[in-house]
Image (spheres, rainbow, N blue to C red):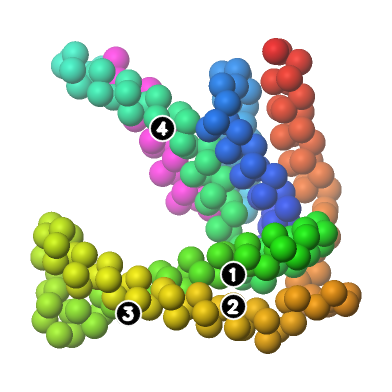
Amino acid sequence: MNKKHLAIDPRVSLVYLLFASLLLIFPFDFRIQTAFLVTVFIMLLFVGKYRQFIVYLVLVCLFKVDWLVGNTWLQVLLDFLAIGLARLLPLLMTMSLAMNLKSIGQWQAALAKMKVPQFILIPLIVCIRFIPTLIIEGKQIWQSLKYRGLAPNKRSVLFHPWRFFEYFIIPLLSSSEQVIMDLSSSSLLRGIQSTHQKTSIYPLQLRLADYLWFGIVLGLLGGQLWMR
């Protein structure tokens, strides 16, 4: 089967990210949270993220067997971690779905199609493009430290806070300023501020599966409001 037909529209990922953020902020009914988790698990299988599916499933199972632990203090610790995981897991899983997109241009095309105002769209696109660029800069800094013999391995820097701050954080902050300037200039040169109709190489169109995902999350939100 063509993988193109197993993709999820970026707007669906955005809606699920917003719903997961609501789960993190507000107390939702346990049944709503469970139904949302099951839905996202199915979506991970739908887009072919089998490794993430197994990792998150193992995490859920790991904190469900705390009653097997004989040590009371360890059981309390696992219960504490399970509560935090229950709040963060939906957000982490939906972020994995959002990262399924191969290009940031798909996010830009989706936000433009949603008629997001320019004063929101431009800073948001710069921020979205900034994160992967910053990761690349960090890898290059780490490689330069290895070549110069300042960091033969990660342990030699990570376990020495002052050395980590001097060798890694300060160069990263210095390069990040230039990265932001370059990304801002690149966005302006590409005409992102233009008010004319823009074309896109990413033809986004909602399919039947996308409407199904939208319907599920709207049903969960409606169920929560009805229960209250």
How far separated are the C-alphas under marks 1 and 2? 6 Å
Precedes in sequence: disc 2 or disc 3 = 3
Magenta stretch, main secondary structure class: helix
Label 4 – label 3 distance at C-alpha: 33 Å
Residue named by callout 3:
140
Q: Which label was assigned to residue 32?
A: none
Q: Is residue 20 left or right of residue 143?
A: right
The reply to whether callout 1 and callout 2 are in contact (CB within 8 Å) is yes
Residue 109 rendering spot, x and y as whole percentages: 74, 67
The residue that label 4 is drawn on is: 85
Amino acid type of the residue that numbered disc 4 sits on in the rendered structure:
Leu
- Provide the residue designation for mark 2: 184
Kind of element beneath mark 2: helix
Q: Residues within 10 Å of mark 3 (few under 14, many from 20)?
A: few
Report, in whole angstroms, how far the alpha carbon at label 3 lies from the one at label 1.
Answer: 21 Å
Disc 1 target residue: 126
Who is closer to the viewer here, 187 or 137?
A: 187
**Toward the viewer: 202 or 120?**
120
Circle 4 or circle 3, nearest the eye: 3
Q: Which residues are magenta?
A: 48-67
Give the left or right position of residue 34, taking residue 224 as reference: left
Residue 81 location in percent, x, y? Answer: 33, 28
